[in-house]
Image (spheres, grey):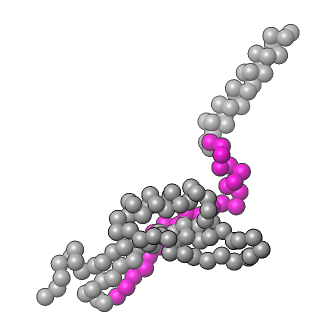
Amino acid sequence: MPLPHTLSRAVEYAIYTYDLPAEGRTHSRWNRHDTFTDLDNACRSARHLMKTRLYSKVEIKKKSFDFSQQKKTDITLKTYELSRFSFWRWPFPQGLFFWTGLALGGLWVAIQTFGASL
């Protein structure tokens, strides 16, 4: 008799981190950081790990075992990657409206300052 659909698969979401290379080393390695049974918790944890900026990559993998076919599957669902130049942009807000507003605000202050002195 086949197993019910909910029992026919065991699913877990594993989070792997790729360390930044240590000083004097050219290679890093993948480490299995944590495992979850809920995708939302796995995504939340992966985003948190990426915000720490300690890892160059963070991956969420879906690992499952299909009992009816006796087969293991491994699928990469999401990869977060640290950009080469992200440290330049990191502390500053991004977006066209922010930078346009900043430029217009600076222009307004300059006009008010130099206009009052004339």
For the image, the number of numbered tags is: 0
Q: Residue furthest front?
A: 23
Q: Position of residue 10 (x, y in %)?
A: 30, 78
Q: Position of residue 38 (x, y in %)?
A: 35, 65
Tell me which residue sits at (53%, 60%) in the image: 49
**Magenta-colored span:** 71-93
Q: Position of residue 72 (x, y in %)?
A: 37, 85
Q: Is residue 82 magenta?
A: yes
Q: Quadrant of the C terminus?
A: top right
User: Residue at coordinates 30% horizontally, 83% vertically from top-left?
Assistant: 66
Q: Name the quadrant of the N terminus.
A: bottom left
Q: Is residue 9 above or below residue 77?
A: below
At a point 39% along the width and 82% down the height, the residue shown is 73
The quarter of the picture where residue 84 lies is: bottom right
Residue 58 in the image: above or below residue 95: below
List x then y, in percent, for residue 97.
61, 36
User: Farthest right residue?
Assistant: 118
Which residue of the protein is positioned furthest toward the bottom in this rendering? 70
Does 73 lie within the magenta span?
Answer: yes
Q: Residue at x 72, y 21 (%)?
A: 108
Residue ranking furthest to the left: 1
